[in-house]
Each structure stands twice: as structure tokens, then as C-alpha cells.
Amino acid sequence: MPGNVPPVRDERDEQARLTPTAGSLSIGGLVKHLARTERGWVATMLQRPSPRSDQEYLDSFRLGPDETLADALEGYDRVARQTEAEVLAIDDLGRAVPVPRGVPWFPQDVEAWSVRWVLLHLIEETARHAGHADLVRESIDGATAFPLMAAAEDWPPSPWMRPWTPPAPSAG
């Protein structure tokens, strides 16, 4: 056993890989997955081919050994900028988006969605995975929504809620 702990560039990368809940979700993996999901739905919306493999799907839920949280966040920002530019170029949000065939979870009795529906679905996907990320993060640091908001927005302490502060590092 080494006498010294190896250097850590940033504890956020370590925390972004943690899977502290019953599932295998991590913060970094969820961010990476959201970027992939948005990219795929925009490709569907614009009727572009979007190669999908089972392995790519599974890999989208975790940071690879050479990936960092910063990489995942930059990738998500890049996809968001691309989505914004592509949506701004669409003149009719009611435009039909053919439902891909051969995908078991897509309805077989619907011919097309609208661009508007796809965008709403992206919001739904993001909200669902934000909830997952909130549970994972809470399992890591114990913080909950209102104390985090109070800390971020500098709310004064009240009798029922105090702004969150990170736990003191353990000695040892």
C-alpha cells in the first residue's frame, strides 16, 4: 500500500464518477448522456442519419478513463449551441418529424411528431436526468435543493433552513 495518496487534479472529477445510489448513474455520465441524447434527437428532428450502437449508448452513461467532468460539460455546451442554431433556422415548429421505424419504444401507430414535440421531449429528457443527477449528488454530499439554492443565491439563514456549506474535510 502506498504511503501517500496519489495527487488529485480536481475532486469534482472523482465525484463526477461516483455511483453512490443503487444504480450505476454518475453525474459526469448523466451530463455526457444528455449531450448524446440531445444530439440524437436533433438528428432525428432534422432527418439526419444518426449511427447508434448499443456500446455507444452504454458508454454514454459514464466518463471514460481519459474524460473529465470539464470534457463532459464542454460537450454538453457545444451540443446546446448547435441545437440552438439549428432550431433558430427552422421556420415552422409544427413541421413534421417522421417517427423512426424499427425502434421498439417508439409508437408504431404515429406517423410523425412535430419539431415542437421533439423539443418538448428534450426538455422532458433533461428534467428526468436532472432529477437523477440531483439524487446522485445528494448521495455524495448530502445537500438538498433549498439549502443549495440558499447558498447559491446568498439567502439569509432562517429558523427552518440554513444555506448549505460543504462538510469539513475529514482528518486522517
Image: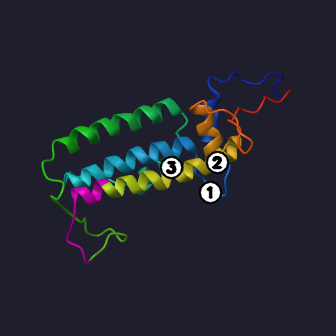
Q: Residue at x 20, y 71 (%)?
A: 111
Does residue 68 appear anywhere in the picture? no
Residue marked by disc 3: 130
The residue lying furthest to the right in this view is 172
The residue lying furthest to the bottom in this view is 109
Does residue 163 appear anywhere in the picture? yes
Q: Dot 1 surroundings within 10 Å: few (below 14), some, or many (20 or more)?
A: few
**Are the residues tagged 1 and 2 within 8 Å (C-beta)?**
yes
The range drawn in magenta is 109-119
What residue type is disc 1 on? Gly
Instruction: Quadrant for residue 99, please give it.
Output: bottom left
- Which of the marked residues, 2 or 3, is nearer the chain's N terminus? 2
For the C terminus, the image quarter is top right
Q: Position of residue 151 (x, y in %)?
A: 63, 33
Instruction: Quadrant for residue 149, please give it.
Output: top right
Q: Position of residue 125 (x, y in %)?
A: 42, 55
The residue lying furthest to the left in this view is 91
Q: Which mark is residue 23?
A: 1
Query: Which tag is nearer the camera, tag 2 or tag 3?
Result: 3
- Which of the marked residues, 1 or 3, is nearer the chain's N terminus? 1
What residue type is disc 2 on? Thr
Q: Residue at x 43, y 51 (%)?
A: 126
Residue marked by disc 2: 19
Question: Taking 167 as reference, is 172 left or right?
Answer: right
Q: Which mark is residue 154?
A: none
Q: Real-space Cα distance between discs 1 and 2?
A: 7 Å
Instruction: Quadrant for residue 165, please give it.
Output: top right
